[in-house]
Image (cartoon, rainbow, N blue to C red):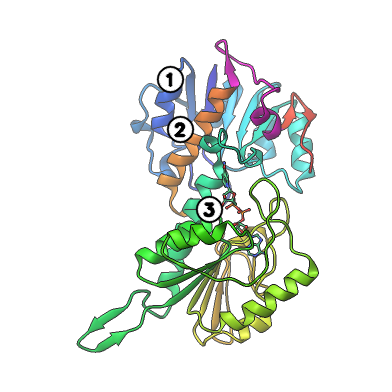
Amino acid sequence: ITVSALRETAAGERRMAITPEVAKKLRGKGLRVLLERGAGNAAGFPDAGYADVEFADAAQVLAQADLLACVLPPDDAVLGRLREGSIVVGQLRPHGAAERIATLAQHKLTTFSLEMLPRTTRAQAMDVLSSQAAVAGYRAMLIAAESSPKFFPMLTTAAGTIRPSRVLVIGAGVAGLQAIATARRLGAQIEGYDVRPETREQVESLGAKFLDLGVSAAGSGGYARELTAEERAAQQHALAEHLKVFDAVVTTAAVPGRAAPKIISTAMVEGMKPAALIVDLAADSGGNCELTRPGERVDHGGVVILGPLNLASGAPLHASEMYARNIYNFVELLIRDGALQPDFNDELVAKSCVTRHGEVLFKA
Ligand code: NAD
């Protein structure tokens, strides 16, 4: 069995789906590892660091791969060069991507998108959403600290005392909790907010204060549900008052398969402190602030709104290490009796499958 990965081609993408550590583990399972030359360079993994791995150009890799691991969805041209029946494992972003799914099916591929794994205990070791969200949350808070005109920590100096920044994290999921932990390490005075009631304890356990806006919207599978119009109005009304005191706000709110909820309106931004800052981690899926422009910096009357994209790629070495381990744990599941034989009775296999030998199993 040949397991492969190519250099990621999406603009700005530096992560790599197979690291030296994971290549070694795959070899230990008796698999052949064939990678595109230089594919790990941008992540900090030069070819020389891979032991007992073969390298070739992309065309040769694709002609021989039984399983292609990827970080982001491969181009149509790449998919077209894989052999019929080959397996693709990665983040295939199938929501709202009918054309991409059609291409996967057309080439008779069996494809698994790890974002669709159920959030169960068994799936945790393969959970790419969690591993990459942790990186994104950390990076978002560092960007907030670096872009703020203020210090995050309290400073007592001969030139007087500097008060710590007040920082709010909206959305206390995996990314939000990591952002909170990072702000704590930087010495900010930090508060967290979420619509899932169980997050209160998680926020408080990190030494942050929980901001209670009186709106509770726990959905299924550990996720939030979309707010009703009334709940949204109540949330906005309460939040508008609170936002006035913060120096920096990091937003991470998401609802699976939907555009990010718009939580911060233009009027709310206009009520914020001068020189306050918003880092919108949800920019990739439309943003939590009405004024966010994905990938851009917006200055709205002195309040700056940043919408950084693909934050996880900004710490590519550790992001890749975690991602590749997720991939390995999933690939292990696909191998039975020494062959690639996904067991479709296993819910992890069935629920993450987008196409099975060309048949579309993904349901939006
Ligand atoms: P996510 O990326 O889907 O959403 C981020 C956060 O935004 C969530 O905490 C959500 O509650 C919050 N949110 C959504 N709408 C909001 C709104 N209108 N206002 C404020 N906040 C809003 O979530 P995630 O981080 O991927 O996961 C959420 C939770 O799922 C985790 O914190 C964890 O408890 C659970 N989880 C379980 C497993 C597992 O058991 N395998 C793995 C990962 C996550």
Contact, mark 3 vs mark 2 (Cβ under 8 Å):
no
Q: Mark 3 points at which residue?
A: 174
Name the mark nearer the viewer: 2 or 1: 1
Q: How crowded is mark 1: few (under 14 residues within 10 Å), some or many (20 or more)?
A: some
Q: Give the extent of the magenta segment.
A: 334-353
Within the displayed image, which quadrant is ligand 1 positioned in? bottom right
Secondary structure found at label 2 = loop
Q: Name the residue located 59 percent from the left edge and 25 percent from the top edge.
A: 67
Residue 344 sits above or below residue 92 on the image: above
Query: Could you tell which of marks 3 and 2 lies nearer the N-terminus?
Result: 2
- The circle drawn on residue 43 is none
Residue occupying the far left of the picture: 158
Q: Nearer the viewer, residue 2 or 195?
A: 195
Give the Cα distance between marks 1 and 3: 32 Å
Marks 2/1 in contact by CB < 8 Å: the verdict is no
Disc 1 residue type (three-letter):
Arg
Q: Position of residue 250 (x, y in %)?
A: 53, 68
Q: From the top left corner, tell me how far across and down residue 321 is, in percent.
A: 43, 40
Label 3 sits on what residue type?
Val
- In the foreground, 105 or 10: 105
* For marks 2 and 1 on the same chain, the one whose residue lies earlier in the sequence: 1
Callout 3: CB less than 8 Å from ligand 1: yes
The N terminus sits in image quarter = top right
Q: Provide residue 218's location: percent of width, then percent of height.
A: 68, 56
Residue 37 tag number:
2
Q: Quadrant of residue 20?
A: top left
